[in-house]
Amino acid sequence: METDQDISPSDNIAAIKARIAKATQEAGRPAAAVGIVAVSKKHGIERIRPALVAGHRVFGENRVQEAQGKWPALKDEYPDVELHLIGPLQTNKTKEAIALFDVIQSLDREKLAKSLALEIEKQGRAPRLFVQVNTGEEPQKAGVSPHNADAFIKTCRQTYGLTIDGLMCIPTVGDEPALHFALLRKLAERNGLAGLSMGMSDDFETAAQLGATHVRIGSAIFGARPV
Ligand SMILES: *Cc1c(COP(=O)(O)O)cnc(C)c1O
């Protein structure tokens, strides 16, 4: 890894941008097509703030409750922050999630689609939505199965009136990530979806080459997560 936890998060972001630029150039894609979601889960405000001061604005958290403890104050200070929910969402937290997040990447079941649609209507606030696909069909992992993705996206759109921006996946550990990224891209293309959230600290260059519009990077920016 070329990044280091002793180096500041903003220096790490700059190094990652350079690596994305190189990867996208090789693939004939513009570097600007790939946005970095800085995954700040488990890190405190003191570790997040330097990235904000340096100008980074797009962040990801995987738990609603943890994000509620950190981000309302930071968003007051930096109103142009774009906060992504990248972890599973329980329907009893939909209200809080709609109020706080600008993008929800973990839409993966009809009950949640229904709950989000009701709450979006109630609050008059519509975060952008990504459908999570369980590309490896792992029983313990969230996400719709690739076989059900087309039908689920249709249900979100037609039954619940939701606008879907893209798809998200987390490849199976030990698999070749490129296979998962290519599958996600195929599913997005055939459903007319522009957004592709794929790639993390260890595989973001591959994802950037295969069409990612969002890479979700935690440890390569903020260092190892505190336990
Ligand atoms: C934690 C997390 C990431 C970031 O992982 P790193 O390997 O630290 O970059 C990305 N996506 C999801 C869904 C995560 O939960």
Image: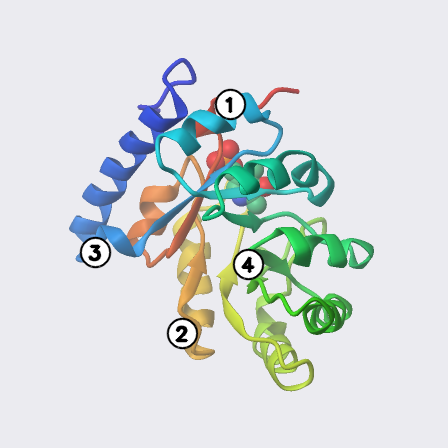
User: The disc labelled 2 sits on which kind of residue?
Assistant: Glu
Q: Which residue is the site of mark 3?
A: 30
User: The disc labelled 1 sits on which kind of residue?
Assistant: Arg
Say the numbered circle drawn on residue 47: 1
Residue 81 location (% of width, % of height): 48, 46
Q: Which residue is the site of mark 4?
A: 135
Q: Residue furthest bottom?
A: 158
The mark closer to the camera, 4 or 1, is 1
Q: Are marks 1 and 3 in contact (CB under 8 Å)?
A: no
Q: Residue furthest front?
A: 77
- Badge 3 crowding class, 10 Å Cα cut-off, few under 14, some 14 to 19, many 20 or more, is some
Q: Are marks 4 and 1 in contact (CB under 8 Å)?
A: no
User: The disc labelled 3 sits on which kind of residue?
Assistant: Pro
Among the two numbered marks 1 and 3 on one chain, the one whose residue lies closer to the N terminus: 3
Among the two numbered marks 4 and 1 on one chain, the one whose residue lies closer to the N terminus: 1
Per the image, label 4 sits on a secondary structure element best described as loop
- Can you say which quadrant of the picture contains the N terminus? top left
Q: Residue at x 32, y 50 (%)?
A: 208
Among the two numbered marks 2 and 3 on one chain, the one whose residue lies closer to the N terminus: 3
Q: Is residue 148 left or right of residue 164?
A: right
Residue 131 location (% of width, % of height): 58, 64
Among the two numbered marks 1 and 2 on one chain, the one whose residue lies closer to the N terminus: 1
